[in-house]
Amino acid sequence: MALSALDFEEIKQLHARYCHTLDFGDIDGLVSCFAPDGRFEISLVPGHPATRQGADLPRSPAGVKASGHGRHTTLGSIIDGDGDSARSVSAVMMTCDFGPPAGKGEVTRSMVCATGLYTDDMVKVGGRWVYANRSFGGDETPEVVDRRRQTPLDIAHVDAGDARPGLSPLDHEAIRQLLARYGFALDFEDYDGFAGCFTDDGSIDAHNPSDAGGVSHAQGRDRLRHFAVSLRQELRGHVRQAAISPVIEGSGERAQVSSYAFVTTDYGKAAQPRQRRKAELWTTGIYRDEVVKVGGRWLFSKRTFRQDTLPDVGALVGRPAGFQLFAG
Amino acid sequence: MALTEWDYEEIRQLFARYSQTLDLGDADGFAACFAADGALDTSGLTQGPGGVWRGQEALRALVADLRERTAGRVRQSALNPLIDGDGTTASATSYAVVTQAYVDGARGETGDTASSLATTGIFFDEFVKVDGHWLFALRMFRHDGLPEVLDLVRTPGRVGPDLERIA
């Protein structure tokens, strides 16, 4: 039996509960996110994963005494499974704050410390989704980068079923996962998976001054594949792209999406500019997308992107929020 | 009655609409995210317009004020939402992530970034269902690092604003 929209939502609530209980030191709450014999595995030191299981979970690296200053934030997840078991891959960002303002006129500040990937196996126990196995790897570790590079994502597109008059919650979730899948496929050089996020004649139009050349346009799967191959050679495997806060509107087989691009980098091991932080925010921008449902699968027919510093984004300010694509 | 998949999705869409209308200066769209007497409590802000903004007119004025200050370069999102409720009321606690794009070709400390993380914090929300649609009854923002957020450490399982404390 396929996962229902409510299953997907409950799994996302599980991911959120994990982050909240971890960051605020609610150890019982954290342990309750796992099955009784659940396992947690973490790779922070390359080649030396640490594992905790069952009754040992509170002693896991994730169960360390929380200071209240650290945050684990899920930026995107793709999920598949059946009615009783599920798997997911999630991109996560770690931030920390510096406490109350130091004095009058000072403001509170936070910084990005690191990014990484959670890979999960979940089971439904007593009607509730819990982790059977949760594994974390920092984006700068070979466990994440080398293992995933140029490897097809092993999590299937959401099958949202036949078209209906309006969008269903499952359609919304399928579209949200398409946004996440685009990021994973591009970041880990799964070029066919990337091209497979688009319709046969789908197109991308992206303006990002941080990229060499600054303007990229590609239409059709072969050219989209080439677009992905040609992006920022020097940062392969070390950029993470998420699309957050998506507003979605549409009918049964066609929808418009407006979302925020949130792009981080860990620079790669050799180039880390600051040892205190393992990653930082790279750029932000706006995606405006047209998506269509083909055989139960939501795909991009047109994806447009503009970095937040560009005039195209400035021109949106003060108008009713909408879905108009950026003009090429 | 437990929240349905539509309830969760509408609340997620409300978060996204709040972000995009506020950040891009759509005052009417932003006010429409709130119930008629809904309020935004930003009294924990350490920078910018701190206070309580109640009612449609006040909420519209806030957007105009922010638009002057930020010129549309700030992006705020509610992530990791923990959502709880029944068919008529709901609450959520989310992580706020706020970024700011650099202006005039400036770059970050490493010389290569186009935006920076401005701040993080917590959104505490109360929702109400009006004519079948979820709206904010109260949204509170508090910066991470402030005492009221640190107080949440080892306070298990609270979702939504602590209304007794606020009163």
Image (cartoon, rainbow, N blue to C red):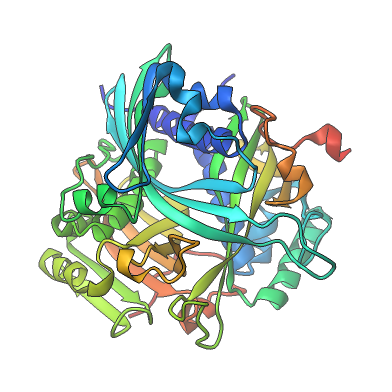
Query: How far across and down, in percent of the image, does residue A197 sit?
Result: 23, 55
Query: Going by the picture, which residue comes out furthest to the bottom?
Result: B104
**Residue in the picture at 40% in, 38% down:** A168
Work out whether residue A28 or residue B10 is closer to the camera in this orientation and state it: A28
Q: Is residue A310 left or right of residue A103?
A: left
* Residue A310 in sight here: yes
Query: Going by the picture, which residue comes out furthest to the top?
Result: A126
**Residue in the picture at 56% in, 83% down:** B103
Work out whether residue B12 or residue B122 is closer to the camera in this orientation and state it: B122
Query: How far across and down, in percent of the image, does residue B167 sit?
Result: 89, 38
Q: Is residue A312 left or right of residue A3?
A: right
Query: How far across and down, in percent of the image, does residue A178 sit?
Result: 31, 50
Relative vertical location of residue A320 with respect to residue B95 in this rendering, above or below: below
The N terminus of chain A: image quadrant: top left
Query: How far across and down, in percent of the image, does residue A118 sit?
Result: 36, 41
* Residue A165 in sight here: no
Work out whether residue B39 or residue A253 is closer to the camera in this orientation and state it: B39
Q: How many labels were placed on the picture?
A: 0
Q: Is residue A236 left or right of residue A122?
A: left
* Residue A172 lies in quadrant: top left
**Residue in the picture at 41% in, 65% down:** A287
